[in-house]
């Protein structure tokens, strides 16, 4: 089948599989804070000594609204919000520490947002020193943060480096002035180059740039231009995200574009194909979905040694069984269960000050969920998955039936005990994972929940 026909056929709304089950399919009725705590304690006991834990800290403030953004954020120029928020994060950390039987060993730490670099270097240091004072730090720690090129300073980079951070990702999106204006994010190349150079000079080992395709007014020339600008800086990793257009969740306020200004499904796919070709010519390797890395970067190495993992932040080069998410809207994962914190800062303050975990929903994974989760993770990370004794054929013929269609379209190789996604099936990885998504199969969405897969 022609590529265009395949794109038309498979460009449907679908999850990005940063978790399984995906958030809209969480069984909230069967979830409670008590169950979250029980599964957390079990998982922590099983894994803390062996591999440590991960911490995700959500820092939601941004000074200016980018109108394409799907993240949880609060726009403000008032920096007096920083300390109140930090004190609440420390109280939440204390609530978790009181539940754990021994000191957690922090292996991975990620500061995400919003904009972590909205906070002053002094305040970030204060936050992290207090978090660390109640924990041990793993000898192979991996600490990373998201920085906005317009407000990340040398002091930010140096302070976080001193605390053990060796990875940073900068939001770039696109260098074209018209696109930047439409998404309300004016950010010249000089700003990105400056922070990238300083991070390198200080000694950061992995610098990543976030680019987005499918933004308003983007065309092939603009994507080429953005990638050419990126080449000058040679970031170790590049996230090349598909623009998730979810106005029914994020609203249309202050947008500098109309839906008609967005590239169509086919045009959008061409932008991706062109970007991929250019990045590969520059020596980058495609990792899973949306990500590229140089051979020297740990993400590439982790793909080779099969340690690569995918979670709510995207791909990581290693993982732990327990990930605690602190802060407004953060999602925690203890492998047996997910839990999400309340989504507004006001509710977050209220719950934590009340000495309650600020969790408002979650999901306890069944045996079947754990089985499917493993296969979806394998596909998203390694583009292949294996099983024993034809167990999927025996127990889940409906999955095989759905996979037959991808096989007929030449996108996968399916055998008694394995599924391998072929090179031309890569673009449809989300659709292929959907074939395994039993929860979605049993209960097809009545309203639009997900962005388009292509
Ligand atoms: C929290 S932001 C990065 C840090 C900082 N706030 C900044 O903007 O530079 C995380 C990244 O998510 C990506 N992103 C946000 N909204 C998106 C959307 N609707 N579709 C695809 N990617 C998106 C952007 O590439 C952005 O850089
Ligand atoms: S892209 Fe970054 S800076 Fe812009 S609104 Fe989203 S989180 Fe804030």
Image (cartoon, rainbow, N blue to C red):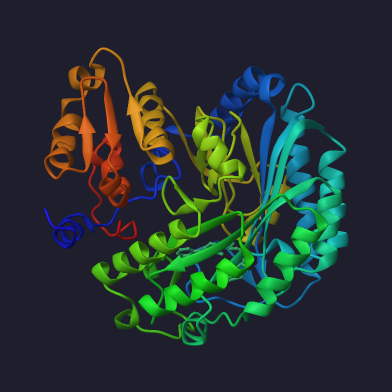
Horizontal and vertical percent position of residue 419: 27, 30
Viewer-closest of 403 and 29: 403
| Residue 124 appears in view | no
Against 54, residue 451 (above or below) is below
Viewer-closest of 222 and 77: 222
Count all numbered tags in the image, as a single digit: 0
Residue at the spot 60% in from the left edge and 23% down from the top edge: 43
Horizontal and vertical percent position of residue 164: 81, 45
Residue at the spot 81% in from the left edge and 71% down from the top edge: 80
Q: Quadrant of the C terminus?
A: bottom left
| Residue 183 appears in view | yes
Answer with the quadrant where ligand 2 appears in the image: bottom right
Q: Is residue 208 left or right of residue 97?
A: left
Horizontal and vertical percent position of residue 380: 40, 41
Residue 277: which quarter of the image? bottom left
Q: Is residue 224 left or right of residue 104?
A: left
Residue at the spot 40% in from the left edge and 59% down from the top edge: 276
Residue at the spot 30% in from the left edge and 45% down from the top edge: 423
Horizontal and vertical percent position of residue 200: 75, 59
Viewer-closest of 22 and 189: 189
Against 207, residue 38 (above or below) is above
Q: Is residue 175 left or right of residue 437?
A: right
Viewer-closest of 256 and 232: 232
Q: Is residue 445 left or right of residue 287?
A: left
């Amino acid at each position: 089948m022609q590529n265009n026909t395949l794109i038309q056929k498979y460009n449907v709304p679908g999850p990005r599989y940063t978790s399984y089950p995906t958030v809209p399919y969480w069984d909230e009725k069967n979830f409670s804070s008590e169950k979250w705590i029980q599964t957390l304690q079990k998982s922590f006991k099983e894994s803390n000594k062996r591999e440590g834990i991960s911490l995700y800290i959500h820092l939601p403030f941004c000074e200016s609204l980018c109108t394409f953004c799907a993240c949880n954020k609060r726009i403000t120029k008032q920096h007096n919000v920083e300390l109140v928020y930090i004190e609440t994060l420390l109280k939440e950390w204390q609530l978790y520490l009181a539940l754990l039987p021994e000191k957690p060993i922090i292996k991975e730490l990620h500061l995400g947002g919003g904009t972590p670099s909205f906070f002053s270097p002094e305040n970030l240091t204060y936050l992290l020193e207090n978090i660390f004072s109640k924990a041990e730090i793993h000898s192979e720690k991996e600490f990373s943060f998201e920085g906005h090129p317009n407000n990340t300073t040398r002091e930010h980079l140096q302070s976080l480096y001193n605390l053990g951070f060796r990875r940073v990702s900068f939001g770039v999106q696109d260098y074209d002035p018209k696109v930047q204006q439409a998404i309300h994010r004016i950010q010249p190349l000089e700003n990105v180059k400056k922070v990238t150079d300083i991070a390198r000079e200080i000694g950061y080992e992995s610098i990543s740039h976030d680019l987005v395709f499918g933004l308003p007014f983007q065309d092939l020339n603009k994507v080429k231009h953005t990638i050419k600008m990126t080449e000058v800086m040679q970031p170790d990793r590049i996230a090349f995200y598909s623009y998730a257009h979810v106005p029914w969740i994020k609203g249309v306020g202050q947008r500098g574009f109309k839906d008609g200004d967005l590239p169509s499904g086919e045009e959008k796919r061409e932008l991706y194909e062109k970007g991929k070709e250019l990045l590969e010519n520059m020596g980058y390797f495609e990792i899973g979905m949306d990500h590229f890395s140089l051979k020297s970067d740990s993400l590439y190495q982790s793909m080779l040694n099969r340690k690569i993992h995918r979670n709510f932040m995207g791909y990581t080069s290693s993982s732990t069984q327990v990930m605690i998410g602190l802060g407004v809207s953060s999602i925690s994962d203890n492998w047996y269960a997910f839990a999400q914190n309340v989504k507004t800062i006001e509710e977050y303050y209220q719950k934590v000050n009340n000495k309650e975990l600020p969790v408002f929903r979650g999901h306890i994974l069944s045996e079947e969920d754990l089985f499917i989760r493993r296969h979806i993770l394998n596909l998203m990370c390694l583009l292949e998955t294996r099983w024993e004794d034809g167990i999927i054929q025996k127990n889940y013929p409906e999955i095989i039936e759905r996979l037959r269609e991808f096989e007929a379209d030449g996108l996968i190789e399916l055998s008694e005990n394995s599924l391998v996604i072929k090179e031309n099936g890569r673009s449809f990885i989300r659709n292929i994972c959907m074939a395994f998504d039993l929860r979605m199969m049993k209960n097809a969405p009545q309203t639009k929940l997900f962005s388009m897969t292509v």
